[in-house]
Every structure is written in structure tokens, then in C-alpha cells.
Image (tube, rainbow, N blue to C red):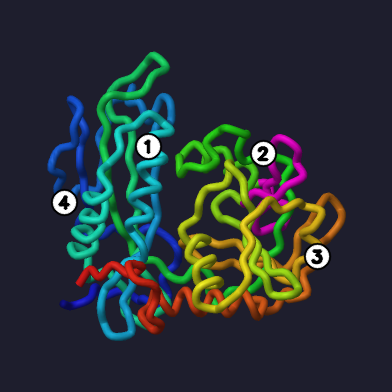
Amino acid sequence: MEKKDIDWSNLGFGYVKTDKRYVSNYKDGSWDEGCLTEDANIVLNECAGVLQYAQTVFEGLKAYTTEDGRIVCFRPDLNAARMVDSAKRLEMPAFPEDRFVEAVVETVKANAAYVPPYGSGATLYIRPYMFGSNPVIGVKPANEYQFRMFCTPVGPYFKGGAKPITIKVSDFDRAAPHGTGHIKAGLNYAMSLHAIVTAHAEGFDENMYLDAATRTKVEETGGANFIFITKDGTLVTPKSDSILPSITRRSLVDVASKILGMKVEHREVYFDEVKDFAECGLCGTAAVISPVGKIYDHGKEICFPSGMEDMGPVTKKLYDTLTGIQMGRIEGPEGWIKEIM
């Protein structure tokens, strides 16, 4: 298979149109068989449910070329299961988990020429999403939906390496107690846009959101979970019903406890204790781990001992192990790697 003529080493993290995408429609109580299409455009009625009441959920995952030349995907079954949970919370019909994984395979195979070669630093980003498609003017769920999946080659999230970032404690709330913070709904990300634009304008890379009820506990950023490393090398991850269950975070927990033999704690993390951690990072699909060097809290600074130059040593070990599994350099737990071709 001949690869597309793309300067893989200079790809940014943006959209590149590929050849095929997957589409399936829900009508009269069931999903159709679905198919691949070359048409990247969507035609909707002006009153479509997604346009009126933001009834949409999505996922994000990647396909990689391994060291031995295979094309694989990382834990797509967990993305499928999480999308079911998201859909149920917004009163949308669940797209079957087995069909979700099949759609990943079909979409990646159809765009195999866009999967970046091993060692390029680039990957194929896959975006499944679903939305209410029929006209809805009263406040109620749509009764017709479309599930789609496209992919695009992307460069590394960090050009020149993952340098520690500076974040701020946000004055905005990301999610309300008993709200939708635990699902991957488009509306959650829309709510974070003003906060992230504000943070960037003030010179910060990201926000740290605290719990909306008491503003004493760490939750997450606009698009990633937090991880912390204690001075004795324990991995700590914040626990809250408002936090999205990150697949990267769950995988890092398993890497830490089952492969690296680390102690792991998944618990409520109070902001007052953040100053006592040795390392801090944000974890998600795009960057795997973004190291945090400094947190700004209304005139006060929390500086981590790992500093602003490099990823902390424990975080680096977690990062290298997980990316090694994803790229086929390290054998991971059974079922983590889905071979595409």
C-alpha cells in the first residue's frame, strides 16, 4: 500500500480531509446497516435537534503504525462503551459497541494510506460522533440520529517535545454536581471555550477546574484528566462524579500498578494538598501526558519540583511505557491493542 504524499514530520494537530468516512442513520427505532462514503459534508434541516438543543456526543481515539509495520488502534472497545454512556445521558439511542469497533476498523482500512509511518511522530486521529438530525422545535430529544466517523492524520501534540506548561485555577465551573461532566458531550466543551480563550489571553496554557459545589477539590481541565505523583512515587488521580472517565488515565493507572509496580490512589484530591505533590500532568488522547510545571492561583504560584524544563521522571516513565505499548515496542495487557491490518 502506497502512502499519501504528506510531509509527515511537519503535520500539525489539525484537520486533513481523508478519502472515506463511516455513516449510519437511526430512524423508526433502529440503526441502518451503515456504509462508507466519500462525501465529507452534512446536510441538515435548519431545525435539526443538534442545532437547537446541542444533542451531540463524540469520542476521540488514534490508529498507529507499529515498529513491525502493523496498523493498530488502542482500546477502541472502551471508546465504544463510553459513547453508549454519553448517549444514554442525553436520551440518544446507543450505537452498538460491536458495530462501533467494526466502524473503526472499516474507516481506518479505507484510509490506510493516511496512517503515518512509524517513527514520524504522527498518528491517525479518529473522531466518532453522533447527533440529533430531525427537526425539533419543542424542548425534547430528537427521534432521528446520525452516527459518523472520520479520521485525519495529525502531528505530535507537542512540537519539539513535551515541555511543562503553566496553568491557572479557573474562576469558571466546568460541570455542576449531577450534571454532564462525566460524559463526552459537545455541550461540555462549548462551555469551556470562553474559559480557555480567557486563560490563553492571560498567558496560561490551560485551566484547572475545581468542584463547583465547594471549590476545594481538583476536578480536571477543559479536555483532560489530572494525574499527580507524590514525593514517594505514588500515582494519585482525582475522583469525582463530574470527571470524564479518561481512557488514557485508566490505562496509565494500569501501567503504574500492573507493569511498573507503583502504588496508585484514586481519590478526592483537595486543592490545598496540590502544593505537596512532586509532579503533575494532564492526560488525554491527543498528548497522552502534558506535564505541568506551574499552577497560578490568583497571585500565588505552585511550582513543582520537576521544574519547567522536562517531564518529571515518574511521569516520563509512565509516558514512555504507555506510548511504547501503543506503538508496539512494549507488549501490553491482553486486549489493549486492536489490530487493523
In the picture, which quadrant includes the C terminus?
Answer: bottom left
Q: Amino acid at mark 1?
A: Ala
Q: Amino acid at mark 2?
A: Asp
Q: CA distance from mark 3 to mark 1?
A: 38 Å
Q: What's the magenta bit mostly, secondary-structure-wise?
A: loop
238 to 321, vertically: above or below: above
Q: CA distance from mark 4 to mark 2?
A: 39 Å
Residue bearing mark 2: 173
Q: CA distance from mark 4 to mark 3?
A: 51 Å
Residue 240 as seen in the image, left or right of residue 82? right
Residue 140 as seen in the image, left or right of residue 224? left
Q: Which numbered marker is on residue 87?
A: 1
Q: Which numbered marker is on residue 276?
A: 3
Percent position of residue 259, x then y: 50, 77
Residue bearing mark 4: 36
Query: Circle 2 — which element?
Result: loop
Query: Circle 1 — which element?
Result: helix
Q: CA distance from mark 1 to mark 4?
A: 22 Å
**Disc with the residue nearer the chain's start (4 vs 3):** 4
Q: Quadrant of residue 332?
A: bottom left
In the picture, which quadrant includes the N terminus?
Answer: bottom left
